[in-house]
Amino acid sequence: MTALSIAGLRKNYGGVTAVDGIDLDIPQGCVFGLLGPNGAGKSTTFKCVLGLIRASAGRVLFAGAPISPVAFERIAYVPECSVLYDWMSVREHIGYMQSSFSGFDPKRARELLAQLGVGDENKRVRALSKGMRTATAVALAFARRVDLLLLDEPTSGLDPVNQRTVLNLIINEAAQGTTVVFSSHQIGQVERAAERIAVMQRGRIVLDGVVDDLKAGRKIVEGILPSDDFSLNGFSSDARIGRLERNGRIVRAFVTDRPDEVAAQMSALGAQGLRVVDLSLEDIFLDAVAPQAATASVVEEV
Amino acid sequence: MPVIFTVDPRSGIPIYLQIVEQVKRSVALGLLAPGEQLPTVKQLALDLTVNPNTVARAYRDLEHDAVIETASGRGSFVRANGSADAASIAAGRDVARGEIDSAVRTAKSLGLGRDAVTDLFDNALDRWLPEES
C-alpha cells in the first residue's frame, strides 16, 4: 500500500523553480532517504507535501487522501530549522505537545530526551546548543504515535553517538510499520537506514530506487585499450553505459546494467586488464549529480 | 548470541549480501551451530543499524540457499536436518564458490588463459590440499 503519493509536484518562487515536477510513490512501512546537494529542493519538497507552503502544481496523497488538518494527528514533521520556541523550556514543550496531539506520550518523550542527553527539562530552548535543539525536536516527534514521519536533516548538528541513536529510532519505527521519509547529507547514514532513496538535483529527481538494487546493478568497468586512438564509438550510445571516461589508453565506463557483458565486449575488442569495480552509494550519488551524467557522452580527459 | 556481524555501508557490496556472506561464514566455521537461533530481524537491524527490510532480504536469501529455516512465530534457525554438518558444508561451499569465481574472473581480466589458470589452481591445491600418499 502506498503511504505517500506525490505526482507532478512543482514550486516556483517568482522566476525560480525550486521543485520541478516530482513524482514519488512511497510504500507503507518504507524508510525513504532523500539525498541531494544544498539547494536541490529537498526542504521545499517536505513543506509542499505538508501544505506548509502552497505548491504551484501537483498532487499529494497521504494514505490515498489529500492531506487535511485531521491528517496531522497521524503525521510528525521535524523541519530543518528548529521550530521550538526560544523562550519556552523543554518541560513546557512537552506540555504543549501533549495538549496539541492526542497520540503524544510524555513518558516516552522523557525517555527519548534522556537517551539523547537532554537531561534538564527546565532549560529554556535558547540555552540549548544547536545539537541539543535538534535532539529535543526529534525526541518530541518520536514520542508521538503516527503513521508517517517526515524528518528534514534529523541528524544535523548531532554528535556521532546521538546520530546513531536517531538512526536506530528510525529503524525501530520502521520495524513497527511506520513510514519514514528523511533527508540527510550523510550518505552513509542514508545507506544504513533507508531501503529506498531518491537523489534530487535542481528540483528534479535524477535517480531513485532500492539502495541494494542500485548498488548491485551499477559498476565501473575499467580497462586498458590497445592504442591511444582506439575508437569507442560502439559504446557511446550503449544504453547500459551511463558515462564513458577516457584518459589515453585507460577507459572507465559507468555501467548501470549487466557490467559483466560490457566487460566481455570490451575484452573481445582487445581491451586488457579489465576490472569490474563495485560502486559505493556515495560514488553512485556523485555520478548522479555530475553534470555529464544526464546523457551518455565520451569525456576526453587531459 | 556469540557471533557479532558487522556491515560496511561504504563498501560497494549491498548490505544484505554482506549479511548473507557473514552468516554463511559463521555457519561454515561452526560459530553458528545447526539448530542455533539467529537474532530476530528487528534485533539484528538495530544491532547493525540497518534497515529491517535489508535484514529480512538477507534472511530470505539464506532460507533460499537452505542455510537457515524460519518457523513462523518462533524465529530463524540454522538448518539442522540431514547430517549435523550438512548446513555447515553447504554454507562453506557457497562462500568458497564466490571466492573462486572472483579469482578466476580477476585472472581472466588480467589476460590469463585457461591453462595458466589451471596451473595456478594446481599449485594452490598442492599447497593447501595435498593428496594423501
Image: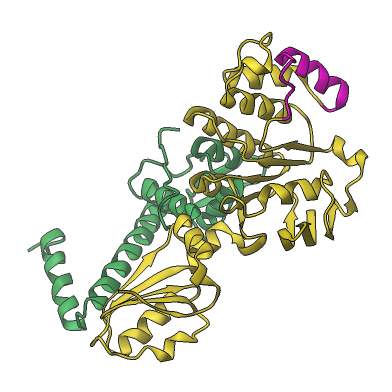
Chain colours: A yellow, B green
Check the image and report above or below for A128 versus A273: above
Q: Where's residue A106, x and y in %?
A: 76, 18
Q: Residue furthest left?
A: B133
Would residue A35 be counted in the magenta stretch? no
Q: Considering the image in quadrants, where does the N terminus of chain B appear? A: top left
Residue drawn at the location 34% of the way across and 65% of the way down: B97
Would residue A87 be counted in the magenta stretch? yes
Q: Where's residue B123, x and y in %?
A: 11, 68
Check the image and report above or below for A214 versus A119: below
Residue drawn at the location 48% of the way across and 42% of the way down: B35
Locate residue B106 relative to residue A261 in the image: left or right: left
Q: Where's residue B84, x and y in %?
A: 40, 48
Look at the image and tell me whether residue B65 can be seen: no
Residue toward you, B53 or A132: A132
Q: Where's residue B28, x and y in %?
A: 35, 50
Residue toward you, A96 or A240: A96
Residue toward you, A154 or B38: A154
The magenta segment is: A83-103
Look at the image and tell me whether residue A212 can be seen: yes
Residue toward you, A17 or B88: A17
Residue drawn at the location 42% of the way across and 50% of the way down: B10
